[in-house]
Amino acid sequence: MQVYKILLPLNVDEPFDYVSDIPLMRGDFVNVPFRGSKKLAVVWGKGESEVEEYKIKKIEDKPDLPALNENLLKFIEWVAAYNLSHIGNVLKMCMSVKFGGKRNKHEPIIPDFTLTGLTETQDEISKILRAKVSNAKYCATLLDGVTGSGKTEVYFEAIDEALNEGKQALVLLPEIALSYQWLERFRQRFGVEPGVWHSARTPKQRRETWLDVAEGKTNLIVGARSALFLPFNNLGLIVVDEEHEQSYKQEEGVIYHGRDMAVVRASIEHIPIVLASATPSLETMHNVDDGKYELLHLPERFGGAHLPKINVIDMRLEKLPADEFLSHTLKEELTQALEKKQQSVLFLNRRGYAPLLLCRACGYRVQCPNCTAWLVLHKSHKSLECHHCGFRGSVPEACPACEAEEKLHPCGPGVERIYEEVKNSFPSARVEVLASDSIKKADEIVTKMGNHEIDILVGTQMIAKGHHFPKLAFVGIVDADLGLEGGDLRAMERTYQLMHQVAGRAGRESDVGKVLIQSYMPENSAIAALIGEERNKFIKSQLAEREKFGMPPFGRLATIVLSGKNEKLVGNYISKLALAAPKSDNVEVLGPAPAPMSYLRGQHRHRLIIKTARNINIQKYIKNWTEKTHLPPSIKMKIDIDPYSFV
Ligand SMILES: [Zn+2]
Ligand SMILES: [Zn+2]
Ligand SMILES: [Zn+2]
């Protein structure tokens, strides 16, 4: 009998001892008894125990599953340590599959790459990337290029190189960018169905893909951030497309940044990674400045400016009638586009009809019962919804506070309201809404738009994603100030990235495209940078500001949020925690204070922000500090390293 350390895919921070009379290797799957049931777990190594062997539980059996390799185990350990997550929870992400059931036996899928014509620069950059893949060493490259510069074509070449060498390639995309259209493009170029990995896959699809990846039967995987935890045995390349997208950050469960962890996995696997973007994140640009990442720049195909003509409407001067949100100039552009039989897009990154229902008799604002948030009116669902916790209620006839009837007034616009305004102004135009809560119909709407069966499309950031509409001539950004409301660290950067992406939709093929931005603060630097096509200057000034305040990527940040049903208890414990913070130079602990979203999903939330110099091991600091804290089970602690969400 031998003692083994067995890691269970549960909320545990270390492996447990079990004995086995069959020899096991690190990475093997085993079934073990745990709290009265049989659990699938992974051998983490040999163990020694002071306890007499007969007192240690015995593993039940070793199922017929491909073992996890050493690189993946190292990656799991790394992710857990960096993000201060329980290692069992990280392991769980690597085996989020229901094993068992009938397996589709098939031969390995052999892609058949179609070469396309590349420009001289594209060809040059392709060759550099192919060489990196064939070199098989860790290196990180930023592929910087706007839509239409051939960025995708170029990284497809690198993927082809990996596949030719019999290796696996992983392409990460933001979940909402994983559209049917995009996958179709993949299919056409590689002649095969790539393995697809995201949250909407069925359990059977997930199991098949997981096993195909482990057995090397699928070498090409396209997926959302969680695909990073698949059991590749022969990975040769990782591509992170739209690397600037904040949706790479997972905010629930194990909190991690998919892009950053992808870089870690590439380094553990000793393989190249390509980060692609038209609007790279400040973090990535800073790594380029520091020489950690190589920069490959794809120029715009036709030289010079690539964005269409952009104008800003100063909404302060517009004096719009109450409850109208589209300026005269914007409507004029819509009229012209309709006359020319061209398509328009109106962008507003807010679902629903109105973000607030206000009583005009008593001033009451209808709030979510579970959150410090107003309920959003959704006319299409005939409901009031909380965009934070998913609460859904009916729309009251009378004010819940003063009982006045017909006094509840919707304030501000969501996409549904913009749709209504467009419909009122242009009754004969064909108008549709594209938002994530119409996600079932998204493919249909995109197809209709592509076939010019829609004149005006009103949408959230869903419209910014990869879709190509050749007849699109006009883009109106309804409220450029929306993203700046939160005022967090990255608000300006995000606003710029999103507007750039949306603006880039207009008239890409010709020079007829026009963009109008409506703003109450038209002088802000994101808008100025967009109009002047001064991206690098904007990034520089944003970086300078971050440096001045010691903010990331120059300093490090983490947040600790305590939450619980009993507000007083949460407040007491966060104060205790704050007092226990070890004194250290170059570490600032800010707070405690109620989090901006001080009540969320029925939990009161109090927060501490930890800010340190770059060279401080913030994980070690927080670990030393919080390890000694004992919290009652009714209070949850959430630690976020490199936070992106500050609500
Ligand atoms: Zn009222
Ligand atoms: Zn809520
Ligand atoms: Zn640009």
Image (tube, rainbow, N blue to C red):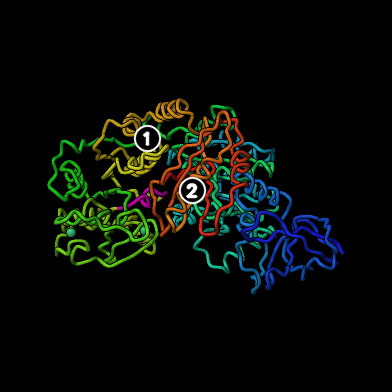
Q: Which mark is residue 506?
A: none
Q: What residue is pinned by disc 1?
A: 306
* Residue 198: image location, x then y, percent: 52, 58
Q: Residues within 10 Å of mark 2 (few under 14, many from 20)?
A: many
Residue 561 marker: 2
Relative to 636, does residue 34 appear above or below in the rendering? below
346 left or right of 209 in image: left
Asked if the residue at tag 2 contacts the one at tag 1, i.e. Cβ–Cβ closer than 8 Å, the answer is: no
| The magenta segment | 459-466
| Res. 218 in view | no
Verify whether residue 464 appears in magenta: yes
Q: Nearer the viewer, residue 304 or 19?
A: 19
On the image, which quarter does residue 543 sit in? top left
What's the distance in space between the residues labelled 1 and 2, CA to CA? 43 Å
Residue 350 in percent (x, y) is at: 31, 52
Q: Secondary structure at mark 1?
A: loop
Name the residue type under label 2.
Val
Foreground residue, 647 or 484? 647
